Amino acid sequence: MKEDYLWDKTGSDSEIEKLESTLKTYRLKDTSPPIIPVVEFETEIATPAKSNWLMRPAFAAFGCLVIAAVSLILLNNLREPEQAIAAAEDTNPIESKIESKNPAPVKIVSSKEEILHTQEKPLKITKASFSTQLKKRRQLARKQQLRAQKISYKKVMKSRAKPKLTKSKKNVVRLTKEEKEAYDQLLKALAITGSQMKIVREGIKGERVNSAEKDGR
Amino acid sequence: MSESGIVQNLFFPARRSKEASSPAKNKLKEEAMLVERVCAGDRSAFDEFYNKLSPMVHGIVLARVPRDEVDDIVQDVFISAYEKLHTLRDKNAVNAWIARIARNRAVEFYRRNKPTVELSENLSHNGTAKNEAKEILDAIRTMPETYKETLVLRLVEGMTGPEIAELTGLKHESVRVNLHRGMKMLRKKLGIKKRQV
């Protein structure tokens, strides 16, 4: 039937076939799709947002490192005074070196220097109890130092001391009157010569000064 | 069909309609998927989209606009469709939506440009076929909108009735009626011209 051919091309219809062949020139030719311009527009398909999720653990790790470093520094500072105290306790605080023959000046070496050294170092004390302990230790060390000085002084004095003249052991020379008068005159002559010698020296010095001044003019 | 099947269809019409519409639903799903892929920027999906709908768009535009301007307008239609496809709410109605764009473009063409007389490409006797085609097309363009679109899609683009119904979104019965009445009107006009010649 003609209607069938018009509807779904079943059967045949010469008139319609002729029209189709005539109008075929106007049919769409195989053309390529248009070039789509690059335009950004919103779509329903959501893209995952870029997240800085990698930065968070990095910051956390950096923070942990900083905290660990600070804690290590604080621990080291706390240990240093404790080590100093332990060292002070172990060693003999006063080691005086005194020689019997040649009384050299007393040298208190280690303890004092240690104390000074510890005193020189800026103590980073964070705990109050540690500071009180340190004071006590210093006081104790000072006392011991003084004791050592006394002992050493005594020793030095002993070594330097002249033999004491006791009554029983006096060496007395007995002179006659004439010997005693001669002895006195001798002493006076020596005194006079000594004073005259002084005068001469002063005179010589004065002449030299005057001659020097004349040459200078 | 077995007796049990007939009984089932009688007592369970909804099931029958569901079964019958399942291929149609699948087609709608495929169209929606295609549109989504085009929106996502899939170039191959856009090519498929163009190849599928370009005959319909060409026919709609050809029924309204001179032959020389049709190709450019078809390209503009698809470019604007690509740009605005994301605004389409019902992705299953993309065919009717792009057909509307094509009609609007054709109307805009006449709004912008002054009406011109289309000259035949070949005025010699050898070009009688082309002249005849032009006359037939001119006759189709003078018809009402519904008839001329359907006839152009059938006679120029070579589509069948069911294909026209699927692409335009019209019912089969509507397309059949349009074809019948349009052909009748065309025969009348061509018959009248032949008599005049």
Image: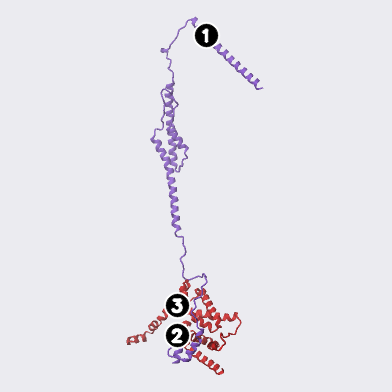
Chain colours: A purple, B red
Image coordinates for residue A73, horizontal then vertical, percent: 44, 46
Classify residue B65 as left or right of residue A107.
right
Residue count near mark 2 (Cα–Cα under 10 Å), binned few <14, some 14–19, many ≥20? some
User: Image quadrant for the N terminus of chain A?
Assistant: bottom left
Residue count near mark 1 (Cα–Cα under 10 Å), binned few <14, some 14–19, many ≥20? few
For the residues carrying marks 2 and 1, which lies nearer the camera in this image? 2
Label 1 and label 3: CA atoms lie apart by 150 Å
Image coordinates for residue A75, horizontal then vertical, percent: 42, 45
Residue count near mark 3 (Cα–Cα under 10 Å), binned few <14, some 14–19, many ≥20? some
In this view, the residue in front, A75 or A167, is: A75
In this view, the residue in front, B118 or B52, is: B118
Report which quarter residue B116 is drawn in.
Answer: bottom right
In the picture of the structure, the residue carrying the numbered disc 3 is B31
User: Image quadrant for the C terminus of chain A?
Assistant: top right
Looking at the rendered structure, the kind of residue marked 3 is: Glu
Say whether residue B24 is visible: yes
In this view, the residue in front, A89 or B134, is: B134
Label 2 and label 1: CA atoms lie apart by 167 Å
Looking at the rendered structure, the kind of residue marked 1 is: Leu
Q: Please, which chain is the residue tagged with disc 2 on? A: B
Q: Is residue B59 above or below residue A67?
A: below
| Disc number placed over residue A186 in the picture, else none | 1
Looking at the rendered structure, the kind of residue marked 2 is: Pro
Q: Is residue A97 above or below residue A130?
A: above
For numbered disc 3, what is the local secondary structure? helix
Q: Is residue A177 above or below residue B107?
A: above
Q: Are marks 2 and 1 in contact (CB under 8 Å)?
A: no
